[in-house]
Amino acid sequence: MRTKVELCGVDTSTLPVLKPEEMKQLFIRLQQGEVYVRDELVYCNLRLVLSIVGRYAYRGEQADDLFQVGCIGLLKAIDNFDLKHNVRFSTYAVPMIMGEIRRHLRDHHALRVSRSLRDIAYKAMQAKERYIAEHLREPTIEQLAQEIEMKKEDVLFALDAIQDPMSLHEPIYSDGGDAIYMMDQIRDKVTEEQWVGTISLQESMKRLNSRQKMIIEKRFFFGETQTEIAQSLGISQAQISRLEKSAVELLQRDFR
């Protein structure tokens, strides 16, 4: 027996699902002028909306609200679907339903974000998608900034501004015992300048080769001496010194 779940007054356990051929016949009738068939198409595709709403449940929005927004996307998909597309309706409808929900989440973000920041963020995300499609790897913040001709600091602020806020009680690690929560990791007296510097350092570290990165981490994050690193890597201390110097110079250039 299915579990009864009420969304917007609809008992989701009773929602029907049509086969592709049945869906096709309904669209033929709709496009021939049988307008009332539209209601049947909506009702028989509410499970599709429901499945997509489930993906966004963690965003803190009410399920009823997201369900209604998803139904708007479903209506748009029904009104614009053409059998000449030669694809299943669900294939066509899913991106439209998801797009409607994403726009709703963007415009009703828990924190008010200026239009200019949102524009920068979405330009950066589009540039990121193009970069990944072309290079099959994620770009650095610096590469994104160059792509959209913006300062990397502005791109960082914009991308961070559209992120969903995280609860202080959000568990971030658990090994089977007591969980570590976000509030456990918060430190006082961290300035905005220090925060940006940390992000910039992380991006700059990506430009180092694997050996340079290892040496910098061992020297400045773990406090090892050049001699200790040389012994662990099986090379001379002089080589470690040269590699460290070249890595530091590269990092310094990024901060100038």
Image: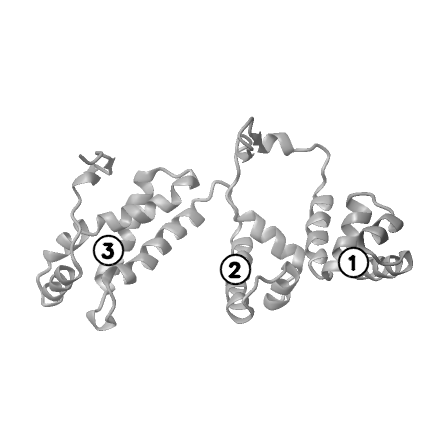
Asked which quadrant contains residue 212, the reply is: bottom right
Secondary element at tag 3: helix
- Is the N terminus in the top left, top right, bottom left or bottom right quadrant? top left
Q: Vertically, is 113 above or below 30?
A: above
x and y percent of residue 115 in the render?
A: 51, 53
Q: Residues within 10 Å of mark 1 (few under 14, many from 20)?
A: some
| Left or right position of 136 against 195 | left
Q: Is residue 177 left or right of residue 47?
A: right
Q: Secondary structure at mark 1?
A: helix
Marked residue nearer the N-terminal end (2 or 3): 3
Q: Nearer the viewer, residue 253 or 236?
A: 236
* Residue shown at the point (46%, 44%) measured from the top left: 109
Task: Find numbered disc 2 in the image and state the secondary structure of the residue it sits on.
Answer: helix
- Residue appearing at x 53%, y 38% in the figure: 166
Q: CA distance from mark 2 to mark 1?
A: 26 Å
The amino acid at mark 3 is: Leu
Neighbourhood count class around disc 2 (C-alpha, 10 Å): few under 14, some 14–19, many 20 upward: some
Amino acid beneath label 2: Met
Q: Amino acid at mark 1?
A: Leu
Q: Badge 3 is on which residue?
A: 75
Residue at horizontal 85 percent and vertical 53 percent from the top: 230
Q: Position of residue 64 (x, y in %)?
A: 30, 39
Tell me: residue 47, above or below residue 151: above
Q: Nearer the viewer, mark 2 or mark 3?
A: 2
- Vertical relation: 188 (above or below) 137: above
The residue that label 1 is drawn on is 251
Which residue is tagged 2? 125
- C-alpha separation, residue under disc 2 versus residue under disc 3: 27 Å
